[in-house]
Image: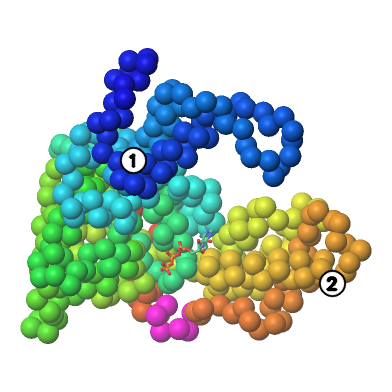
Amino acid sequence: MKTPDNTGLYLEEKLLNPSEIERLLLVTLAEGSTGVVNENQNPLAKPLIKKIQIKDITNADKVLFNTYQSQQFIKDGLEYLNIFKNPKDRYTLNKFENRILKECFIFPSDIKTTFNSIGGLKKTKVIMNELITLPLKRPELYKTGILKETTTGILLFGPPGTGKTLTARAVASQCGANFLNIQMSNVQSKWVGENEKNVKAIFSLARKLSPCVLFIDEIDALLQTRKGEFTPHYMVNTLNEFMQEWDGLNSRNDGVIVIGATNRPFDLDEAVLRRLPRRIFVSLPDAEARAEILDILLKEEVVGHSKEERKEILAYVASKTNQWSGSDLKNLSIASVMNAIREQIVEPDKKNEIVRIVEKKHFDMAFDSGDIVPSLNEKTGIIIQLQEWNAKYGTGAEAGGYSGHSSVFGF
Ligand code: ATP
């Protein structure tokens, strides 16, 4: 059947299976009945169908084709097309690169974090800006001369929940870079030799996606120190491949920055540390930073009855949360807002109030419940270990722990 408008659509040449024929007929019937009014308005009456014309079939075919195309678009991963510097690269990815793209890529539009969504960490933000934003935005400035080796990578280390991931994401969004979020599971394969191929794919993909932040969470798990003959073969191979790719990245400087995050920097292999000359301690926040974090976490909530009262309440909570991490403060904030909501439910006359007001007593209730406690404190072994490591190897940002290095650049 050739369409009357000569668009070149030949249904007879189409290979359709029975379910596709059924779908085509149903959509054709729908197309054919469009605009036909059932005059007796009886919902049980048989729908009136006007005479089916060829154009109804061709319209139905187009509708189905468009649906198929958009499904195929996602199936083929074409939604990734415009993230590549050179769109041709999208079609030439090997199966390892394709898998890493699907598992680890985060669309820049999905990253809502900016430096403004991070409380405290003032020095960290400054350092990240100086060391990363410019090299990512203007990689050509760093391709030659002494600056060639200034952008190898940055290590963010510190206790859990202090904003390391948040910082890496903010860097990417701040300079409009792509973001690859790599974890151990993305590299480890049960097949011999595939770990190395995954590592290769991570780096080659990052280059094709440049400017790109390659964020390696829990980098200690992936690149832990070699313990002589006790280290399994596959781990040594992965580590060696990683180092080799990393060196390639450094020598070319093509707008890819590696940011590693860890709670256990002391477990990292020496070779990895050499490639991460800037090591920034992201420590537990002080009182001022805690008030700032609370303000950010509760930015959409009404805290207190005035601006001044809000400030007072947040300062009060900050003073009572020594050694709490940002993520602990998040748990506390959720519990306190829940207390405010519970009160609204219990007091029925308040149920029509649109705004819930979080008051000091709601935070006190959360403290008193004993359910919300800091996950760490200064006496915890890990904090002491981190402080010691920072004093020896850190670049000296937050934490008040001066590292002994005279420059934020870590040389
Ligand atoms: P981990 O080591 O466990 O991976 P992390 O240091 O990467 O932890 P994040 O994942 O960045 O911690 O933070 C966890 C959550 O805690 C964030 O989503 C955020 O809500 C809150 N948070 C932590 N630190 C801050 C901060 N400085 N400012 C604002 N929110 C914070």
Q: Mark 1 sits on what residue?
A: 73
Query: Horizontal placement of 144 versus 381: left or right?
Result: left
**Circles 2 and 1: CB atoms closer than 8 Å:** no
In reply to whether residue 379 is colored magenta, the answer given is yes
Residue at horizontal 51%, vertical 78%? 375
Q: Secondary structure at mark 1?
A: helix
Q: Amino acid at mark 1?
A: Phe
Q: Which mark is residue 346?
A: 2
Query: Horizontal placement of 28 versus 92: left or right?
Result: right
Q: CA distance from mark 2 to mark 1?
A: 50 Å
- Magenta residues, as a range? 378-383
Residue placed most toward the observer, 126 or 223: 223
Q: Quadrant of residue 165?
A: bottom left
Instruction: Identify the mark nearer the N-term, 2 or 1.
Output: 1
Residue 365 in the image: x percent, y percent? 74, 77
In reply to whether residue 411 is colored magenta, the answer given is no
**Outermost top residue:** 5
Residue placed most toward the observer, 178 or 409: 178
Q: Amino acid at mark 2?
A: Val
Which image quarter is the C terminus in? Answer: bottom left
Residue at horizontal 33%, vertical 42%? 72
Q: Secondary structure at mark 2?
A: helix
Residue 178 in the image: x percent, y percent? 34, 44
Residue 258 in the image: x percent, y percent? 27, 54
Q: Quadrant of residue 12?
A: top left
Q: Which of the two marks, 2 or 1, is nearer to us in this view?
A: 1
The yes-or-no answer for disc 1 within 8 Å of ligand 1 is no
Residue at horizontal 31%, vertical 53%? 102
Residue 376 in the image: x percent, y percent? 49, 79
Q: Quadrant of residue 399?
A: bottom left
